[in-house]
Amino acid sequence: MTRVVWFHCFSGIAGDMTLGALIDAGADLKEVQSLVNELPVDGWSLTAEATLRCGVAGTDLQVHVEGPQDGHLAHRHAGEILAMVEASGFPERMERRARATFEALAEVEGRLHGVPPAEVHFHEVGAIDSIIDVVGTCAALEVLDIDEVWSSAVALGGGTIDSAHGTLPIPAPATIGLLGGAPVYGTNETFELTTPTGAALLAAMATGWGPMPDMVVEATGYGAGDRDFDGRPNLLQAVIGTKADLVGPGVGAGQPLVQLEANVDDATGETLAHALARCLEVGARDAWVTPTVMKKGRPAHVISALCDPSQSAEVARVLTTETGSLGVRGHAVERWSVARSFETVDLDGHQVGVKVSTGRVKVEHDDAARVAAATGLPLREVVARAEAVWRDSQPE
């Protein structure tokens, strides 16, 4: 049996909301604390209190930092936090999830600030409370014996927020960087609904995105955000259950998507390639070009993009502006995707992402190309070695 959790991020997601939702759904707080206590950090404690957000009951999870050290002031480098996780003796799955979360944060922050990931200086995320939020969430998943993490489209706020780097737009650069490839949508809330910590947890652990996967529901929990909004419960919903048998076309509803297309007969290959890249940048799940013949025998191309309904307007805009097409057509489709997970392997000191599904492991091309450029190795050798490292790391 595969046990799954689906997070409904209708009011965004943050680290404390995630841990609160899992505890509200049945993760025993004492068991979670017992696992997190293995972390070599003292002077903290957890409390979980019942609360209401717009009349809906949830759990308000708080990390309390003892003594004169304020949890919001104790900042650490990514390498230091990863070393703490490695030294903790966590269960293997819990350690892997915690490492993947901090590595995802470090990679994005490193790109934003132009430093190697291990040297990234975490500010808010390096504080004790944020570290406990991440490790505690991984512990709660372990207590609940969760095999797969799924998520809805993620709500984002707006406005600006004060940070250690000054006033930043919402969503914060790290947040939107972490959610690349994930379905997101804006709201009218001038508040940070989704934090970098929440985004990192999803980026590191999400098996898939979209509506609730087929499951036999066992429990539901709600984790509360810090404030109460008018007309919007500031809660994260967690639905836990056992995964039902996979369904195929004609058997049950798949993930609803929109396929957009435009015919183009006067664009260069470079223009088409750029249009594909832009579609993916604004949220398309996939994009491709198909050669065709138009009226009067003109050779042309059909550029297609697959996207969530909430992203269709923006993807359609990109198709028209980047190709010069005078129109875009679209139709609703359903998709049945195979479950997969995203992991990281170490190849001679270089972090390489791999996508894992049943019977297959596939190396992320951009990571492999980066390592090939850094080491001088052929791309195919980097791919083969990274796949071998992942296979060697699996228990027999």
Image (cartoon, helix red, strand yellow):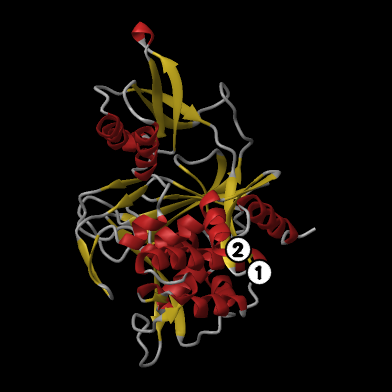
Q: Position of residue 349 (x, y in %)?
A: 60, 70
Question: Does the image show residue 143?
Answer: no
Q: Return the residue found at the far right.
A: 396
Mark 2 to mark 1: distance in Å?
A: 8 Å
Q: CB under 8 Å between callouts 2 and 1?
A: yes
**Could you say where residue 224 lies in the image, as x and y percent from the top left?**
35, 61
> Which residue is located at x 28 percent, y 37 percent?
314
> Which numbered mark, 2 or 1, is in the foreground of this view?
1
Residue 286 sits in quarter = top left
Amino acid residing under circle 1? Pro
Q: Is residue 14 among what the camera can see?
A: yes
Identify the residue at horizontal 39%, vertical 92% (top origin).
67
Secondary element type, mark 1: loop
Using the image, determine if residue 105 lies above or below residue 149.
below
Image quarter hosting the C terminus: bottom right
Q: Position of residue 211 (x, y in %)?
A: 45, 39
> Crowdedness of circle 2 by 10 Å Cα count: few (<14), some, many (20+)?
many
Q: Nearer the viewer, residue 95 or 218?
A: 95
- Residue in the image at 52% along x and 70% along y: 135
Query: Looking at the rendered structure, which numbered label has been put on residue 169?
Result: none
Q: Secondary structure at mark 2?
A: helix
Query: Of the numbered discs in the image, which one, if any, rests on residue 91?
Result: 1
Question: Amino acid under label 2?
Answer: Glu
In the picture, measured across the screen, residue 55 lies left or right of residue 284, that is: left
| Apparent side of residue 360 relative to residue 269 in the rendered image (left or right) | right
Q: Nearer the viewer, residue 41 or 394?
A: 394
Dot placed on the residue nearer the N-terminal end, 2 or 1: 1
* Residue 179, above or below 326: below
Please give the residue where the numbered disc 2 appears in the rendered image: 142
Q: Residue furthest top?
A: 296
Q: x, y (%) of residue 245?
A: 64, 36
